[in-house]
Image (spheres, grey):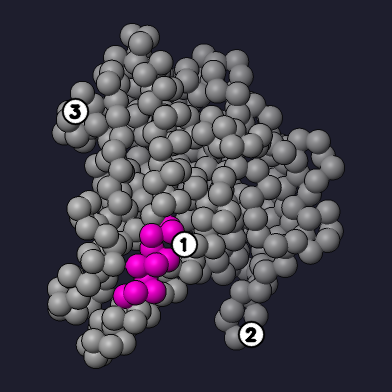
């Protein structure tokens, strides 16, 4: 179900806006402040229920209204997903989401990825970025893993509460045992998925490295860190760290600290690649994710990339656009009118231009 049409009403700066997309490649261009990122944000909210710009979805309501409406039609024009957000008197936002005029829950109607500036720091940035990337992929292809994750986090909050309040060893130990039991299940899911992820990623990136465009990716690898000491069981690791955890007020060991680290020829990628090369690597990872998802089941994929031109130099930008152009999925890029990205996009016939 690639995106064919998006209609916005009272969303951010748009009073009304009707956008028609190609099933292939799209380039939304406009000046700063024209609403390019807001279009991507609306798609994210409609499908996933939350904004990547604010923790309060009511901030997305146009200041002259008390509601916003977003609707999206798929390429076959037989499916329409609509969301209405109404700002209630108590200040809360109520959501009404419908699929073909029938109530529906939040969920992925296709595999949606959004690449923002923060995602392009994934390799050298905070572990949370890499962890969230891997976990979100896993949740999409293995929904049962998300249930385990939620159960684990529920127990984790209880253990952290006990640690912060410095409660007795009996209560902390009880939550520690429960956390270890559920944590082993979660870690097993993470590790099994990681191995599949690693295999697909290395095969694809090594193929890219064999052509001269991406020679800097030769001998790329990614390694798994489960979030606690390898030589110990999770239970022993949690028990051994109780004094430290009480002192800092939270649980320092476990699959919620899982990480995956990227290497080039045995060295940390963040130490041997330039900033531009790191961003190219990350964008290629997002493009490869479609192969990973389809290794589990056939799934339509839509990739949103915000302000790509501001993140890459001219040479790397052209290389990435070539890869994007060769990708079979629907992709929606945004860029500032008059800058390098707009000029380069004109060299690729697959892109539909959308002016704001």
Q: 210 or 253: nearer the eye? A: 253
Q: Which element carries disc 1, helix, strand or loop? A: helix
Q: Which element carries disc 3, helix, strand or loop? A: loop
Q: Is residue 143 above or below residue 209?
A: below
Q: 44 or 7: nearer the eye? A: 44
Which residue is label 1 attached to? 149
Q: In this view, does 229 lie to the left or right of 172?
A: left
Q: Is residue 17 left or right of residue 249?
A: right
Q: Does residue 326 show up?
A: yes
User: Quadrant of residue 204 in the image?
Assistant: top left
Which residue is label 2 attached to? 89
What x and y, as percent, mark residue 19?
69, 41
Q: Do the residues labelled 2 and 3 touch (CB within 8 Å)?
A: no
Q: Do the residues labelled 3 and 1 touch (CB within 8 Å)?
A: no
Q: Split into 4 quadrants, where in the image is the C terminus?
A: top right
Q: Which element carries disc 2, helix, strand or loop? A: loop
Which residue is label 3 attached to? 266
Residue at 17 percent of width and 30 percent of height: 267
Residue at 25 percent of width and 63 percent of height: 253
Q: 152 or 209: nearer the eye? A: 152
Q: What stretch is highlighted in magenta?
A: 176-186
Residue at 69 percent of width and 39 percent of height: 3
Instruction: Label the magenta part by its dominant secondary structure.
Output: helix
Q: In this view, does 179 lie above or below 80?
A: below
């Amino acid at each position: 179900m690639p995106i064919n049409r998006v209609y916005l009403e009272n969303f951010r700066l748009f009073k009304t806006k009707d956008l028609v997309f190609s099933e292939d490649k799209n380039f939304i261009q406009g000046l700063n402040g024209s609403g390019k990122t807001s279009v991507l944000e609306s798609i994210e909210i409609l499908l996933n229920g939350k904004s990547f710009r604010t923790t309060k979805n009511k901030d997305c309501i146009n200041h002259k209204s008390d509601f916003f409406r977003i609707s999206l039609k798929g390429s076959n024009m037989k499916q329409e997903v609509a969301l209405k957000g109404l700002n209630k008197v108590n200040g809360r936002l109520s959501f009404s989401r419908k699929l073909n005029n029938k109530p529906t829950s939040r969920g992925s109607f296709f595999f949606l990825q959004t690449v923002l500036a923060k995602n392009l720091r994934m390799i050298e940035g905070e572990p949370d970025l890499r962890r969230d990337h891997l976990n979100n992929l896993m949740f999409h292809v293995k929904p049962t893993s998300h249930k385990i994750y939620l159960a684990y986090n529920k127990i984790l909050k209880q253990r952290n509460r006990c640690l912060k309040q410095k409660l007795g060893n009996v209560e902390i130990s009880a939550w520690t045992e429960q956390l270890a039991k559920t944590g082993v299940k979660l870690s097993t899911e993470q590790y099994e998925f990681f191995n599949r992820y690693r295999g697909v990623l290395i095969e694809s990136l090594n193929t890219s490295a064999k052509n001269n465009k991406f020679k800097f990716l030769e001998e790329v690898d990614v390694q798994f860190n489960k979030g606690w000491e390898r030589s110990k069981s999770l239970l022993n690791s949690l028990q051994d760290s109780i004094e430290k955890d009480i002192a800092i007020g939270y649980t320092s060991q476990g699959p919620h600290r899982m990480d995956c680290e990227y290497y080039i020829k045995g060295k940390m990628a963040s130490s041997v690649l330039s900033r531009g090369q790191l961003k190219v690597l990350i964008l290629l990872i997002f493009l490869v994710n479609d192969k990973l998802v389809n290794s589990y089941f056939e799934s339509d994929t839509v990739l949103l990339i915000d302000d790509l031109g501001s993140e890459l130099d001219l040479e790397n930008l052209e290389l990435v656009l070539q890869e994007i152009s060769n990708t079979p999925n629907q992709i929606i890029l945004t860029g500032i009118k008059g800058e390098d990205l707009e000029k380069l996009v004109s060299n690729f016939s697959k892109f539909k231009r959308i002016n704001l």
